[in-house]
Image (cartoon, rainbow, N blue to C red):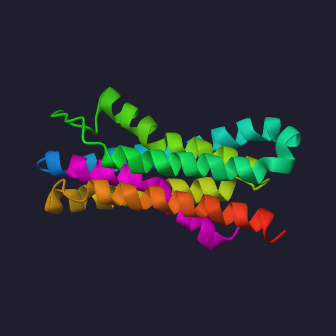
Amino acid sequence: MDWLTIFGIALALAMDAFAVALAAGAVINPITRRHLFRLGFHFGLFQALMPIGGWLLGMTVQKWISSYDHWIAFGLLAVVGGRMIHQALDEEEDKSASDPTRGLTMVMLSVATSIDALAVGLSLAMLNVSVWFPAAVIGVVAGILTVCGMLLGRRLGNDWGKRVEVCGGLVLCLIGLKILLEHTLFK
């Protein structure tokens, strides 16, 4: 897998974290370095660990599904991307007044924003791609975009969060389509 595709996947997966960070930045006043570190570190860590978990799961079943694995990768990425778009366009929003960078709230947000990375790890296993470098890139990009999102959220408020999630969902769908076309038309 080329580095541009890995970076595209990392950016797409980080959109959930970025959108949540925008919202967190809009509600935390003032934002301290501690807030930035906690949320950035945890979002990055979970984004890096989830693809590894998905990859390990996928490696156990890869030999049985290798003839149609590209369809599975396409389906998983399309579902994840579609879900991201659907959630971004959903009118119901969970508004929490507590500090999202502390305790159980932070852990739940970390898991929720990284679940998509589990499916990506499973897709990487189906494609017989090593997960270690992509997981590191995904984690670093998510951590950086989380910090940027919090800082930007402080300035912009909550207006752009949904648009960013929609873009991330579209990128995941397009990457899934690229994988499918590479394995069916160009094989």
- 68 vs 134, left or right, is right
> What secondary structure do most residues of the magenta stretch adopt?
helix
Location of residue 113 by image quarter: top left
Residue bounds of the magenta highlight = 1-25
The stretch drawn in magenta includes residue 18: yes
- 128 vs 88, left or right, is right
Q: Is residue 45 visible?
A: no
Q: Residue at x 37, y 44 (%)?
A: 87
Front residue of 12 and 33? 12
Q: Is residue 172 above or below residue 41?
A: below
The quarter of the rendered structure image containing the N terminus is bottom right
From the top left corner, tell me how far across and down residue 111 is, in percent. 45, 36
Q: Is residue 84 visible?
A: yes
From the top left corner, tell me how far across and down residue 6 is, in percent. 61, 64
From the top left corner, tell me how far across and down residue 132 is, in percent. 68, 53
Location of residue 138 by image quarter: bottom right
The stretch drawn in magenta includes residue 147: no
